[in-house]
Image (cartoon, rainbow, N blue to C red):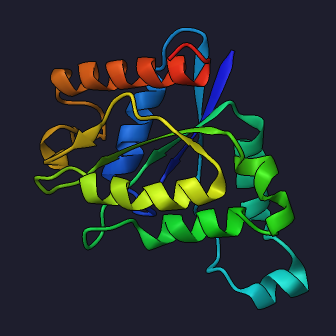
Amino acid sequence: MTVIVGIAGSLRKASFNAALLRVAGERMPAGSELHIASIDGVPLYDADVEAESGVPAAVARLKDAVAGAQGLLIATPEYNNSLPGVLKNAIDWMSRPSRDQARVFQGKPVAIMGATPGGMGTALAQAAWLPVMRSLGLRWYTGGLLYVSRAASVFGPDGGLADPALGERIDKYLAGFLEFVNGRA
């Protein structure tokens, strides 16, 4: 069984990216599972807190989940044409202490998708993640793109998928990512 950890980069209860991640979890290819982890409860990074208390429990759970998975799937919002601060903060915490960074990230396959109410999907946010992922030693999936524009029209009021064409795009993206994770792409 191939286990992928999914993280949505928004704290909003009705987050389009959390909905996108839930839909992806329902559509994972046979032989794979998506375990959705949360960044809720991750405090703002503070080196003084780290020195005095170590890594917070919420961060330790995230680190262990990612370290134990075969891949990482991020659903990123786009804020002000870039990546979301709350998710960047969680990733920054997960890279601490630096001696543990390789255990969590080194060589781990990562795919990034995103949904936004706007018209450009999350193209700029996804591009902004590239140097971060590179510096952490993650292996970026480049076999496909999944930008979801006008998210309010593709998800129903319950957060379920209201657009069958998007479902097909998600299926193709996940299949490609799983091939990459399993060394077949």
State the image coordinates of residue 167 (x, y, percent, origin top left).
Answer: 27, 23
- Residue appearing at x 18%, y 21% in the figure: 164
Residue 14 visible within the image: no
Q: Quadrant of residue 54?
A: bottom right
- 183 or 91: nearer the viewer: 183
Is residue 5 shown left or right of residue 78?
Answer: right
Residue at (81, 48) in percent of width and height: 103
49, above or below 154, in the image: below
Relative to 89, is 123 on the left or the right? Answer: left
In the image, farthest residue toward the bottom: 48
Which image quadrant: the N terminus?
A: top right
Q: Position of residue 173 (x, y in %)?
A: 36, 25
The residue drawn where x is 39% and y is 53% is 76
Q: What residue is shown at x 48% (from left), y 20% (from top)?
A: 28
Tell me the quarter of the picture where residue 156 sits: top left
Of residues 126 and 185, the one drawn nearer to the viewer in this rendering: 185
How many marks do you count on the picture?
0
Taking 174 as reference, is 85 above or below it?
A: below
Question: Where residue 16 sits: x, y (%)?
Answer: 31, 49
Give the image location of residue 57, x and y in percent.
80, 64
Do we see residue 95 in this rendering? Answer: yes
Q: In this view of the protein, which residue sits in the foreground, 67 or 184? A: 184
Q: Is residue 151 left or right of residue 170?
A: left
From this view, report whether residue 184 is shown above or below residue 151. above
Res. 101 image quadrant? bottom right
Q: Is residue 57 left or right of residue 15?
A: right
